[in-house]
Amino acid sequence: MAEHIRVLLSEKEVDDRIQQIGEQISRDYAGKQVHLVCVLKGGSFFMCELAKRISVPVSLDFMSVSSYGKDTKSSGVVKIVKDLDESIKDKDVLVVEDIVDSGRTLSYLLEMLRDRGPKSLHLCTLLDKPDRRVVDVDVDYTGFQIPDEFVVGYGLDYDQKYRNLPYIGVVEFD
Ligand code: IMP
Ligand code: MG
């Protein structure tokens, strides 16, 4: 089946919004160091752009959890593929995600991270699909709320493709 990409959020719209969130985080974390935890691979493009726009001291770590393959629906199975390199105990942790969809991945992840004793734990996501929520998740910073459509770009993939698009697009099948 052939597919094509329809632009949903342009590169400028995304970059402008990341700038705003960076400024907001810099205000909220004034006088602190923020420890960004990136959920690979999707969160990586957003985290790098966001980190550049935060003016308080930043440290970074990465983790990877099982994600969708070719399927566009959440399996509900969350597995840690790569854990963090450093302890998050007593750190001001901000988890950076590409998208909150059903909320299953994030609710599991946040619970697990909370057990490790961070000083604070918050969540920043570039995209949110509220219509798809199955499990409640408190999102502290949201780039955009989007409709229930499968999106790619800015780190998000379809079957590992399109992560490198500098905008957010919807996959449409011909
Ligand atoms: P959740 O557990 O259903 O909230 O899904 C979380 C993960 O599913 C995200 O971090 C993405 O990796 C993936 N995902 C959910 N929706 C999309 C989408 O529209 N495009 C690409 N990946 C998605
Ligand atoms: Mg993700």
Image (cartoon, grey):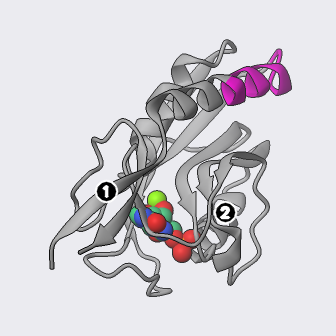
Name the residue beneath numbered marker 2: 110
Expressed as whole percent of the image width and height from the top left, the position of residue 12 reads 51, 27
Q: Is residue 85 visible?
A: no
Q: Residue at x 21, y 57 (%)?
A: 161
Which image quarter holds the C terminus? bottom left
Callout 2: few (<14), some (14-19), or many (20+) C-alpha neighbours within 10 Å? Answer: some
Expressed as whole percent of the image width and height from the top left, the position of residue 171 reads 34, 65
Q: Amino acid at mark 2?
A: Leu
Residue 137 vertical position relative to residue 18 in the rendered view, above or below: below
Label drawn at residue 5: 1
* Closer to viewer: mark 2 or mark 1: 1
Expressed as whole percent of the image width and height from the top left, the position of residue 116 reads 66, 56
Residue 48 vertical position relative to residue 90 in the rendered view, above or below: above
> In the image shown, does 119 or 101 lie closer to the viewer?
101
Is 122 situated left or right of 38 in this image?
right
Q: Residue at x 74, y 39 (%)?
A: 90
Q: Is residue 25 magenta?
A: yes
Residue 145 vertical position relative to residue 11 in the rendered view, above or below: below
Quadrant of the rendered image containing residue 70: bottom left
> In the image shown, does 36 or 136 lie closer to the viewer?
136
Magenta stretch, main secondary structure class: helix
Q: Read off the magenta span.
A: 20-31
Q: Residue at x 25, y 61 (%)?
A: 4
Expressed as whole percent of the image width and height from the top left, the position of residue 159 reads 23, 68
Q: Residue at x 69, y 15 (%)?
A: 56
Quadrant of the rendered image containing residue 59: top right
Element at badge 1?
strand
Residue lying farthest left? 1
Q: Is residue 25 visible?
A: yes
Residue 90 vertical position relative to residue 54 in the rendered view, above or below: below
Element at badge 2?
helix
